[in-house]
Image (tube, helix red, strand yellow):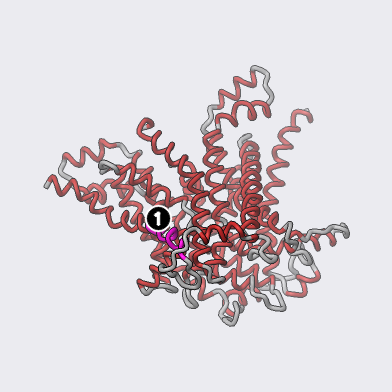
Amino acid sequence: MIAKHWPRLIVYGVLVVAAFFFLIPMYVMIVTSLKDADQIRSGNLLSLPSGFNIDAWQLAWSSACTGVDCRGLKPYFWNSVSMAVPAVLLSTAWGAINGYVLSMWKFRGSEVLFGFLLFGVFMPFQVVLLPMSQVLGFLGISSSISGLVLVHSLAGMAGTTLFFRNYYTAIPRELVNAARIDGAGFWRIFWRIVLPMSTPIMMVTLIWQFTNIWNDFLFGVAFSGADSKPITVGLNNMANTTSSVKNYNVDMAAAIIAGLPTILVYVLAGQYFVKGLTAGAVKG
Amino acid sequence: MKSVENILPKLVIAPGFILGFAFIYGFMIWNGVLSVTGSRMLPNYDTFVGLDQYVQLWQMDRWYVALTNLGIFSLLYVGGSMAIGVFLAIFLDQKVRAEGLLRTIYLYPMALSFIVTGTAWKWILNPSLGLEKLMHDLGWTSFQFDWLVQSDTAIYCVVIAGIWQSAGFAMALFLAGLRGIDDSIIKAAQIDGASLPLIYWRIILPILRPVVFSTVLVLSHLSIKSFDLVMALTNGGPGYATDVPATFMYTMSFTRGQIGLGAASATMMLATVAAIVVPYLYSELRAKPHDR
């Protein structure tokens, strides 16, 4: 009987060990953020904090220093919010319209056009950094949140178009054709038929765009000014500040704060997050 | 009326596509132009230098370090994420309890920013307080783990953190692929007396080939773009030991005032990604009409 159970034990053993590998960094972040400097020195990575000490969290949020600026992560957090919300909405709306046209109002060359757009999903953004910073300068929005919104909307458009286009191609053509015979036009079909059916892909795209834009570092570090740095840049500056005393507890609290919005989205809308990941990866 | 209906769709998407194409292809060309100028602190379009920047780039020791690191990182990151991903997917596919919970745990790092995970791993891999101290406390006093601060090993720390972040993603892709395979194939092979590992190796994995392809594609293009993780974990250091092309490009363009050189390195990155992605996109888009 035992021999029969061996394979199951191995399966569970491997899975549980793997779960630990994935969970330990999160555990370490949380316990470290609750320790004070003495406990960090005397204990080790895995040791539990002696109490529930949220000083590090308060410091990280409102008074830790990044360079000479000692306002904590709070301003960066709100920068990220005011950058991500419009950029996510804009790029999603853009993708919905593009996808609608490319799947239901195909014209000669629309597939080729789509193919060329698709390369934007894979393009290394390093290529656009220098021209973009010039354009932002010409437009007078360099180092501003509106500049970042523009960049993220443009950078996200190829991906959102891909999502919506693939989703809409699966909608039966008869539906649209019938509506057309009834005299419904381009916009009417979009608002009344296509958009109401779009909730699932809308969720996927919103979540995908939100995690991408919230987590972005490259555009944030290249294009933001003193008052428009997103939270990833704030966190990186805080954690990489070369000061004599490293406050690992504050760094860890800051890291959790920076990751909280996307983790929350992942926990609350996990299935859509996974769909977005896999859809973004497998479909062409 | 008919003609309006015909051009309306094109009119509607035109602004987006014009801006999008300017962003993708216009900037690509613009970057290419910059790379053949002698631009330094500021773009300078009057100084055409031909391929000088590229020649200079390929003579730089630092560029070779960046390329070597990219090679090491890509190979181990893509290979490691896929190997762990495929194993986890196969094990998860054995009708285990709490599958949903385990999947959630494996995948959550993907929701986090590389900056966040980089900050966390930097602390774990810290030689004096992190993993090394833990091992010492556990009684293994001769344990030494200072990879992060040694210039010849720091890149492997980037690999560890990268795999931690992406293995769950590979797992999700493989699991989706496995779920698409008919159980009867496995049953039939089992009746023929094949062992489970053999079935997976000989039958299931070959069926999953398209998933393997797209996973390799996505992970390898991610690894070429990888920038945040290196910045957060090592900041390219010690010295420039963990530079990759993405950090090289950023440093040259934005902190060293070598815009022409930065543009040239960006072009090299673009060429690498294009070499991987263009054949894939081409085959995908050509195959499309027949599928539908």
Badge 1 is on which residue? B24
Q: Quadrant of residue A91?
A: bottom left
Give the chain letter at badge 1.
B
Does B170 appear above or below B42?
above
Q: Nearer the viewer, residue B84 or B77?
A: B77
Direction from residue A234 to residue A89 in the image, left or right: left
- Residue at 52% of width from left, 61% of height from top? B53
Any part of residue B276 in sight: yes
Any part of residue A215 in sight: no
Does B172 appear above or below B67?
above
Q: Nearer the viewer, residue A1 or B133?
A: B133
Majority SS type along the magenta span = helix
x and y percentages locating residue B177 in the rendered image = 53, 36
Q: Nearer the viewer, residue A13 or B143?
A: B143
State which region is magenta: B24-37
x and y percentages locating residue A246 in the rendered image = 70, 74
Does B71 appear above or below A148?
above
Direction from residue B215 to residue A150 in the image, left or right: left
Q: Quadrant of residue A184?
A: top left
Q: Nearer the viewer, residue B177 or B232?
A: B232
x and y percentages locating residue A9 in the rendered image = 74, 37
x and y percentages locating residue A198 in the rendered image = 35, 48
- Residue at 23% of width from left, 47% of height from top? A189
